[in-house]
Image: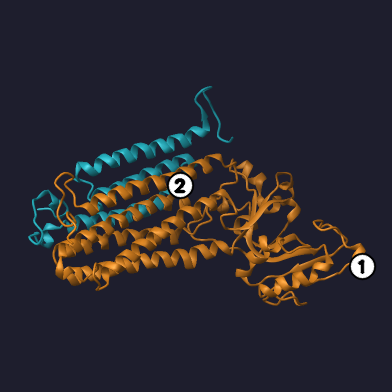
Amino acid sequence: MSASHDHDKKVTPGSEPVYKWSDMHLGLYIGVGVGLLLATALTVALSYWDLGRRNNFILAMILATVKVGFVAAVFMHLKGEKWTIWKFLLFTIFFCSGLFLLTLLHTSDPIFGTTHSVH
Amino acid sequence: MQIPYEVTARPDTGLYNAKLGIWLFLASEVMLFGGLFSAYVFLRLGAEDGYWPHGLLNVPVGAMNTAILIASSVTVILAWMSLKMRKFMHFKFFLGLSIILGLIFLVVKLAYEWPQKFEHFGAFIKQDALEKYEPYLGNKYLKEKNLDPRVEVSGHIHAVEVTVVDPSKKEHLEKFLESHDLEIGADPHDAKLQIVKHKQPKSESEAPPAGEKESAGKVEGIRPGVAEDLEAVAGEKMESVNGVKIVAFDLGLDPVNAEPTNPESDRPHFWYQGPTETPGRVEVKDVESWSAFTPKHSPYFAVYFTITGLHGLHVLAGVLIMIYFWLPIEGGAKMFKRNPEHLTNRVEVVGLFWHFVDLVWIFVFPIFYLL
């Protein structure tokens, strides 16, 4: 039995189940928390490894995205969450990605195929 | 009146209403912070070489704040779990711990990190004056090593030299200094701000026109020793004193300017490197722009203060809501006896908000502190 998904069950007010420690995935939450702390230390350490500014940036963003993925999936219970929530989150991800793509377009000219780093 | 679906799931969505509401709110928050992060990308990609600062923030302190937020995310989850198990005292303990961690984050940010920036000063040098400031910038050395040039001289202000171009405004200046708790005196070593040299024009007719500072030796040096007064003196307020123009800044240089060709300054340090006692002087005529490390300083600090400020407001909001649920009041912890599942759902909702705040910081930390 998982406490994070008990809305799957037909529960009437006042008759909600009471959980025990063994039902609550305590180890998972603590493990993810410790993992996030270690990943933060790793992010700091890797930033002082000179791979070139671009590569350092990409590496740090990959690590941050993985960390955010764990926070969303485990702490925010998105893993196994209702499709209703996923639907509008996917819309959000789509529009947010579009926002970043539009921003990145300022460094390029898709009509003439040129690129420039400073306008 | 009982509001439906605040405890049990609504049949069509499969969620209780507050949960659907918080996720819709978080989706809008993603777009809000997404817009600000894309502004960061825009500004950073558009910055010319040398104009995007590196290594100005305190990495250990930022890392500590990251750890504090991650720990608070775990304790919020534990508070929610405690309610699921109907362990009220456990809930109070873990939610209380989350509140304390959130407050520590805010105190570190507002009482330490931000004030440290406000006391720091930087002047961007004009392109045609870079050669003159080579001893502070070390650009020949940087070019040899294929590194970005330096265009800024920064540190802590030790003195601001001004010209009184309009003697009739002398009284105005004295009032300004007095209103900012500054002193006019003769001892340059006194800890307070002082005008150490004062030569009035012989007559009104000899006074130079307002706005011209390079005039007939009418120079006054104001020596600040009180860090928090520096922005007041060096900032726009001083410019607003009619008839007074800033001529130069005397600084205690930052390590990168004190030893610009030291290989250790090639890349940002892990430990914070405060300004040195090595003196440096920057003349205003050679300066493109100057400011304390405030949003006015550069696009970097503008976007830094905007994003961390907005994030800080979210932390404050989260803490206030958690305090509300922690207190023994109706709608808060008192609800445990009457409707424990409703309180559990409320804590889950604030927990989702809190995890989002944590999630935003996970991106803020590397892009501002490390990269």
Which class describes the residues within 10 Å of circle 1: few (<14), some (14-19), or many (20+)? few
Which class describes the residues within 10 Å of circle 2: few (<14), some (14-19), or many (20+)? some
- Rendered image quadrant of residue B81: bottom left
Front-most of B274 and A81?
A81
Q: What residue type is labelled 1?
A: Ser
Residue B36 has which mark?
Answer: 2
- Mark 1 lies on a secondary structure that is loop
Q: Position of residue A40 (x, y in %)?
A: 36, 54
- Mark 2 lies on a secondary structure that is helix
Upstream in the sequence, badge 2 or badge 1? Answer: 2
Numbered-mark total: 2
Front-most of B364 and B92?
B92
Measuring 86% from the left and 69% from the top, which residue is drawn there? Answer: B200
For residue B322, above or below residue B46: below
Residue on which disc 1 sits? B203
Check the rendered structure and report the hue given to chain A. cyan
Distance in Å between CA atoms under marks 2 and 1: 55 Å
Q: What residue type is labelled 2?
A: Leu
Measuring 73% from the left and 73% from the top, which residue is drawn there? Answer: B175
Q: In this view, does B358 lie to the left or right of B48?
A: left
Chain identifier matching the orange colour in the rendered picture: B
